[in-house]
Image (cartoon, rainbow, N blue to C red):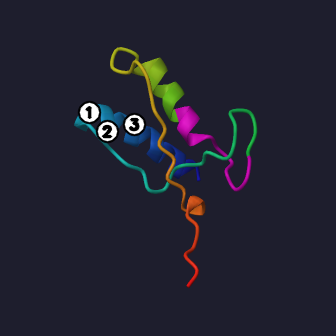
Amino acid sequence: MRFQTGGSILAGKLALERGWAINIGGGFHHCSSNKGGGFCPYADITLLINFLLKYEQQHVKSAMIVDLDAHQVRPIRM
């Protein structure tokens, strides 16, 4: 999961360079910055945004998280 978290940070760097990027292995949003939660040991989205605001502040003014979790989808009953 550390590699997946690193992939989120890399995706953020690539998004600045190329206009967009995606990390299909990331998205550990159930934890907070000081403790894990659910199955998530690292807050990769929070770490990514903090990284970009700290090291790429000349390119990043704001950030938006779009959460498209599969668990939000309800099954259709027939």
Task: Read off the residue under disc 2.
Answer: 14
Image mark for residue 12: 3
Disc 1 is placed on an element classified as helix
- The amino acid pointed to by label 1 is Glu
> Spatial distance from mark 3 to mark 1, Cα to Cα?
9 Å
Residue at the (44%, 56%) spot, across then down: 24
Magenta segment range? 37-47
Q: Mark 2 and 1 residues: CB-CB less than 8 Å, in contact? A: yes
> Spatial distance from mark 3 to mark 2, Cα to Cα?
5 Å
* Residue 75 lies in quadrant: bottom right
**Which SS does the magenta portion mostly show?**
loop
Disc 3 is placed on an element classified as helix
Q: Mark 3 and 2 residues: CB-CB less than 8 Å, in contact? A: yes
Query: Where residue 61 appears, x then y in whole percent?
Result: 40, 18
* Residue 17 lies in quadrant: top left
Q: Residue furthest top?
A: 58
Residue at the (54%, 49%) spot, across then down: 27
Image mark for residue 17: 1
